[in-house]
């Protein structure tokens, strides 16, 4: 049998799209039980409220019957959006009624909807440098030109951003939005201070652009008195599009997220979403709403934070002991990651990943993909939420041996 030449049937997007390093890596690691993995942004399964979710699922099907198993409206079930309205007011101080909320199939779906709605080929999207690589993928797939702005321990450098915005506007570029992860940033673990947030909002107003606030990690904070106010709660001009999810605070397998924005934007997101997936899973929407009402999310977060704090502290201690003098990094006050930069830039984390896996049996995500300007090939994103404390200590020890061997 002769197979067709499938390549000639692919779209331009399908031809240019690249595999996600994280997804490919996770698939490989699942087959290698001897590898200690710092890859992925995977919650610790020990925090999953399995018994309570089982009770809730049974209750939802018995109580809502056919409605829980039926198609629902694209924007999301009204009762669920009302529950989320109360939730974000209590925990993120965001005032939004149900018409300002749309339910999405995880936050990645929200990023896809956002890009399809706002980005034409050649439009500029400004991001942090580094930033969440799957957001970069969603924007690039729609033809965006990515402009990265450097960060420090206080988040995006808004003074650099101001100069870049000014030059882009003066040169006639179409800047559609500024994408940021303000709290527990992925991959760097940084958190914006209030002055930076206020300046960012002022710049969006001055240069007439939107801000996309991606907020999966603000519930996972390890230090007291950390600035975690949402940009959306400070937004007086409806310039902020807010995205969040239950993936890190309840269970990622539910695939439920949400976007909050002005009703005009929500309506357009709804129209775009209709042709992507009709609506997000009805049953899962009801489960998430009931988990909020019963306080299950709050309980899950209260269980996760001390557990993740211990793991973060273990990783930082191990890095300082095993990689001292070899790497630099920001100590995260929240989130799930530490981004390490090997001081010797001859170290290329992407090219050396195979060696780390096969010879040293330790996995990381190469950091270059998080850097829109092509820099950061000497960096590695390390996740501390999934491995045990013992695995963290041993895995970082292996990383030390691996890095030293690679630099010889």
Image (cartoon, grey):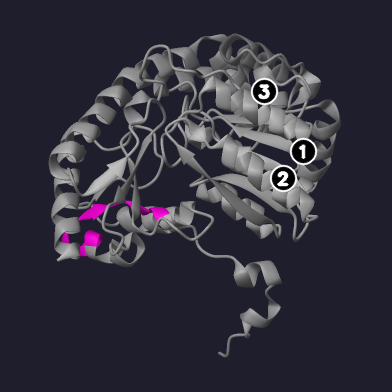
Instruction: Locate residue 209: give its quadrant.
Output: top right
**Distance Cα–Cα, label 3 vs label 1:** 18 Å
The reply to whether residue 69 is in sight is: no
**Distance Cα–Cα, label 1 vs label 2:** 8 Å
**Residue 207 has which mark?**
1
**Distance Cα–Cα, label 2 vs label 3:** 24 Å
- 59 vs 279, nearest the viewer: 279
- 234 vs 303, nearest the viewer: 234
- From what the image shows, is residue 314 above or below residue 351? above
- Spot occupied by residue 333 in the image (x, y as percentages of width and height): 38, 25
Left or right, 164 with reference to 21: right
Q: What element carries label 2?
A: helix
Left or right, 188 with reference to 63: left
Q: Earlier in the sequence, mark 2 or mark 3?
A: 2
Image marks 2 and 3: residues in contact by CB distance under 8 Å: no
- Spot occupied by residue 71 in the image (x, y as percentages of width and height): 75, 34
**Residue 232 has which mark?**
3
Q: Name the residue under label 2.
A: 166
Name the image quarter holding the N terminus.
bottom right
Instruction: Locate residue 69: give its quadrant.
Output: top right
Crowd band around label 1 with a 10 angstrom C-alpha radius: few (<14), some (14–19), many (20+): few
- Spot occupied by residue 189 in the image (x, y as percentages of width and height): 41, 35
Q: What element carries label 3?
A: helix
Q: Residue at x 70, y 60 (%)?
A: 143
359 drawn magenta: yes
* Magenta span of residues: 356-367
Q: Residue at x 62, y 85 (%)?
A: 5
Q: Which of marks 3 and 1 is nearer the N terminus?
A: 1
């Amino acid at each position: 049998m002769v197979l067709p030449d499938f390549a000639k049937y692919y779209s331009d997007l399908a031809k240019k799209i690249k595999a996600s390093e994280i997804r490919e890596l996770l698939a490989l690691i699942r087959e290698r039980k001897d590898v200690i993995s710092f890859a992925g942004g995977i919650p610790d399964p020990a925090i999953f409220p399995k018994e309570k979710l089982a009770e809730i699922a049974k209750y939802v099907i018995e109580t809502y019957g056919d409605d829980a198993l039926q198609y629902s409206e694209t924007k999301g079930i009204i009762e669920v959006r009302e529950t989320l309205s109360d939730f974000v007011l209590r925990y993120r101080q965001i005032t939004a009624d149900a018409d300002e909320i749309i339910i999405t199939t995880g936050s990645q779906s929200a990023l896809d909807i956002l890009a399809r709605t706002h980005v034409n080929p050649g439009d500029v999207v400004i991001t942090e440098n580094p930033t969440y690589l799957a957001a970069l993928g969603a924007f690039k797939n729609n033809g965006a030109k990515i402009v990265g702005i450097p960060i420090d321990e206080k988040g995006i450098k808004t003074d650099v951003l101001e100069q870049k915005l000014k030059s882009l506007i003066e040169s006639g570029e179409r800047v559609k939005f500024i994408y940021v992860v303000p709290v527990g940033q992925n991959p760097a673990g940084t958190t914006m201070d209030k002055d930076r947030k206020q300046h960012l909002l002022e710049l969006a107003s001055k240069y007439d652009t939107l801000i996309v606030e991606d907020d999966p990690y603000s519930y996972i904070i390890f230090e007291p008195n950390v600035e975690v106010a949402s940009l959306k709660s400070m937004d007086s001009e409806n310039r902020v599009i807010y995205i969040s999810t239950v993936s890190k605070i309840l269970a990622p397998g539910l695939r439920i997220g949400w976007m909050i924005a002005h009703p005009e934007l929500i309506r357009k997101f709804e129209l775009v979403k209709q042709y992507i997936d009709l609506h997000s899973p009805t049953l899962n929407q009801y489960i998430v709403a009931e988990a909020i009402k019963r306080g299950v999310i709050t309980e899950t977060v209260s269980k996760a934070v001390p557990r993740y704090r211990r793991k973060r502290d273990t990783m930082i201690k191990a890095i300082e002991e095993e990689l001292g003098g070899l790497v630099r990094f920001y100590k995260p006050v929240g989130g799930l990651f530490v981004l390490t930069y090997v001081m010797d830039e001859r170290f290329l984390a992407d090219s050396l990943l195979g060696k780390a896996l096969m010879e040293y049996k330790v996995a990381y995500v190469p950091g270059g993909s998080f850097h829109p300007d092509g820099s950061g090939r000497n960096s590695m994103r390390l996740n501390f939420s999934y491995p045990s404390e013992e695995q963290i200590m041993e895995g970082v020890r292996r990383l030390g041996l691996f890095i030293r061997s690679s630099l010889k």
